Image (tube, rainbow, N blue to C red):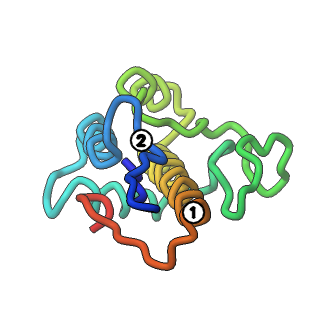
Amino acid sequence: QVIAYSRRRYRILGETLDVAVGNCIDRLARLLQIPNSPSPGYNVEQLAKRAAVTPPGTPKPSGGPQNPVGDPKIKQGHPKPIICSSQAVTPKLLESGEATPEDLCFSLQETAFAMLAEVTERALALTRARHLLLVGGVAC
């Protein structure tokens, strides 16, 4: 959840509908059989760094388009971003060769963190806050 305290009131400005980001990353790690040592999130991040290209649909910084169809800088044929419907999609993408584990890790990580950054920016703009406190497993 993204919660803002402003004018003596707490406001929920964003939340997931089904699963927390850290749990989603852990699920992907389990699906890809990524080891838990030192942590699943760290290992997903290391695989994401090795992704060959930016998959289409991965959010761009600065509010870029969510679906860059025809963008010549992006190699076509890579998976669309996934957000924890990964249990059904991941095996199919891997079996078909459409995606590598690195691509899936990159896509999930970039999409989830872009969404968190966007809702946090909105919260700061709405409340005109000068300070930000991040808490929780993914924030740390």
Q: List x then y, in percent, for residue 92.
A: 46, 23
Q: List x then y, in percent, for residue 86.
A: 40, 30
Give residue 75's mark.
none
Three-letter amino acid code of the residue under disc 1:
Glu
- Judged from this view, the residue extending furthest toward the left is 37
Q: Residue at x 84, y 53 (%)?
A: 72
Q: Is residue 15 left or right of residue 135?
A: right
Decide which of 129, 111 is in the foreground and name it: 129
Q: Earlier in the sequence, mark 2 or mark 1?
A: 2
- Judged from this view, the residue extending furthest toward the front is 8
Q: Residue at x 36, y 47 (%)?
A: 1
Decide which of 88, 63 is in the foreground and name it: 63
Q: List x then y, in percent, for residue 133.
A: 35, 71
- Judged from this view, the residue extending furthest toward the bottom is 130
Q: Which residue is label 2 attached to?
A: 15
Q: Which residue is label 1 attached to?
A: 121
Place residue 91 in its image quadrant. Answer: top left
Place residue 63 in its image quadrant. Answer: bottom right
Q: Pointer 1: residues within 10 angstroms few (<14), some, or many (20+)?
A: few
Three-letter amino acid code of the residue under disc 2:
Glu
Q: List x then y, in percent, for residue 78.
A: 63, 40
Q: Is residue 58 left or right of residue 17?
A: right
Q: Residue at x 35, y 25 (%)?
A: 87
Task: State the SS at label 1.
Answer: helix
**Vertical relation: 75 (above or below) 7:** above
**Vertical relation: 49 (above or below) 1:** below
